[in-house]
Amino acid sequence: MAATMNFFRAQDEARGRTTKLVVLLVLAILMLTGSLYAIAVYAKGELMERGSLDWFQPKLFLATSGTALVVILGTSWWRISELAKGGAFVAQSLGARPVSPHTKDLAERRYLNIVEEMSLAAGLPKPACFVVDHDSTINAFAAGNNPQDAAVAVTRAR
């Protein structure tokens, strides 16, 4: 007998993993900022009379943490703007090729039929369909910000 999946338990577990990932991201950012600050203090080489480094330098801290924040936010904004171009852009940027609605390939035709049937059953527009040739790292993915710009891709090992 096949085990049935408890959707709500899986949803709670996914929320827990997301919370852990957010906490780890914040810790990584704090460690990065602290490391940059420590390197900057050491590189600046301001020694106190006792021969130890002056670790409390507010201006240097603001400069290093501000620089790290600008780089992190800038990179995040750039990636979000790339992803906002839609599911088809994401699929093509990962090396996928669009599947023609007039394809003669039986496997691709079956793939298009399955996607069309599922979208009809769900009452959603049919997403753009893509195939990733010669990639064994992933077997399928869906991308897009909403049903209108969605795309699905499958891999095809030849």
Image (cartoon, rainbow, N blue to C red):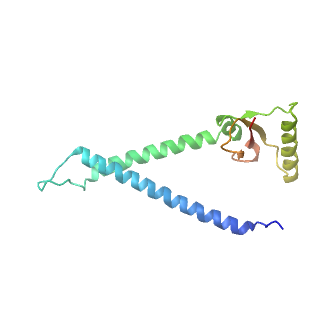
Query: Which of 81 and 135 lies nearest the eye of the viewer?
Result: 135
Instruction: Give the number of callouts.
Output: 0
Q: Which residue occupies 40% across, 46% down?
A: 68
87 with respect to 38 (left or right): right
Q: Which residue occupies 43% across, 48% down?
A: 69
Q: Quadrant of residue 143?
A: top right
Give percent across and percent down for residue 49. Answer: 11, 54
Q: Quadrant of residue 115?
A: top right
Query: Which of 110 and 33 lies nearest the eye of the viewer?
Result: 110
Q: Which residue occupies 38% across, 48% down?
A: 66
Residue sticking out furthest to the left: 49
Query: Which of 147 and 38 lies nearest the eye of the viewer?
Result: 38
Q: Quadrant of residue 4?
A: bottom right
Q: Is residue 146 above or below residue 102?
A: below
User: Where, quadrant-wise, is the N terminus in this rendering?
Assistant: bottom right
User: Where, quadrant-wise, is the C terminus in this rendering?
Assistant: top right
Give percent across and percent down for residue 27. Answer: 45, 58
Give percent across and percent down for residue 70. Answer: 43, 44
Q: Which residue occupies 12% across, 56% down?
A: 50
Query: Which of 113 and 82 lies nearest the eye of the viewer?
Result: 113
Give percent across and percent down for residue 78. Answer: 54, 40
